[in-house]
Image (cartoon, grey):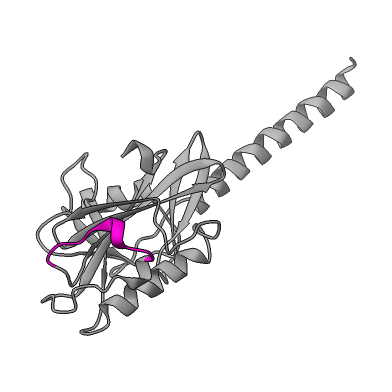
């Protein structure tokens, strides 16, 4: 290779390296999550949170897995960024995770809000599920844990929802449709909780 060709090859190599570095810098910049005031609200003294992200992004083997958030309107945020924000702002102890996320409702509209929640997820992650029949239901007196299985890009997830019903005791075997269940509208703070479990199925819970 003569000196002129060598110079051209070196120049091309430098341009390629600079281009790659530029792309990496852009990528790093665009993946920086901005969590604004009001995007994360602690609910009570335990690790319960109201979040307003449009999507919560989980990761598995370098793949980003987007999960929509009911009543979310802000930017997309990685789950790790959410945790880091909580640690930085003393909302969670370092290394801990949230117990659940919270949906609050107006007085007398808790059951209505719960049904809207399910219909929202029927439009995306639960589009292939019969939302009237959760994959699993576990009673606790008048409360009920319900579980839905779903996948994002082939990765299994579980949506777990905890509701307080208007019954003192509830028998899951008698429930033909989850829409037949009325929530406890007499709660001081009408609410229900939910969380996402990555890389799990309801059978393993």
| Closer to the camera in the image, 61 or 38 | 61
Quarter assignment of residue 38? bottom left
Give the residue at x 23% y 50%.
98
Span colored in magenta: 168-177
Pick the quarter of the image with the N terminus: top right
Task: Please say if 25 is above or below 30.
Answer: above
Residue 141 can be seen, yes or no: yes
Pick the quarter of the image with the C terminus: top left
Question: In the displayed structure, does residue 186 sit left or right of residue 21?
Answer: left
| Closer to the camera in the image, 125 or 77 | 125
Question: In the displayed structure, does residue 69 sit left or right of residue 87?
Answer: right
Give the residue at x 19% y 79%.
185
| Closer to the camera in the image, 29 or 80 | 80
Residue 71 can be seen, yes or no: no
Majority secondary structure of magenta residues: loop
Percent across and percent down for residue 61 are 50, 33
Quarter assignment of residue 56? bottom left
Does the magenta portion include 106?
Answer: no
Question: In the displayed structure, does residue 9 sit left or right of residue 133?
Answer: right
Give the residue at x 53% y 66%.
123
Q: Residue furthest front?
A: 174
Give the residue at x 35% y 61%.
35
Percent across and percent down for residue 173 are 30, 56
Percent across and percent down for residue 103 are 28, 69
| Closer to the camera in the image, 103 or 146 | 146
Task: Please say if 33 is above or below 44.
Answer: above
């Amino acid at each position: 290779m003569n000196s002129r060709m060598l110079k051209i090859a070196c120049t091309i190599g430098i341009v390629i390296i600079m281009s790659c570095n530029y792309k990496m810098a852009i990528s790093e910049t665009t993946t920086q999550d901005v969590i604004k005031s009001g995007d994360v609200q602690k609910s009570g003294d335990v690790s319960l949170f109201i979040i307003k992200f449009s999507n919560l992004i989980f990761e598995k083997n370098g793949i980003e897995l987007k999960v929509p958030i009911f009543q979310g309107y802000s930017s997309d945020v990685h789950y790790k960024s959410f945790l880091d924000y909580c640690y930085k702002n003393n909302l969670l102890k370092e290394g801990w995770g949230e117990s659940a996320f919270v949906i609050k409702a107006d007085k007398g509209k808790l059951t209505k809000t719960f049904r809207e929640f399910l219909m929202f997820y029927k439009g995306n992650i639960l589009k292939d599920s019969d939302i009237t029949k959760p994959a699993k239901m576990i009673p606790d007196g008048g409360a009920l844990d319900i579980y839905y299985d779903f996948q994002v890009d082939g990765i299994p997830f579980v949506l777990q929802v905890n509701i307080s019903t208007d019954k003192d005791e509830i028998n899951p075997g008698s429930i033909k449709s989850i829409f037949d269940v009325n929530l406890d509208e007499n709660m001081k703070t009408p609410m229900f909780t939910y969380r996402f479990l990555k890389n799990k199925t309801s059978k393993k819970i």
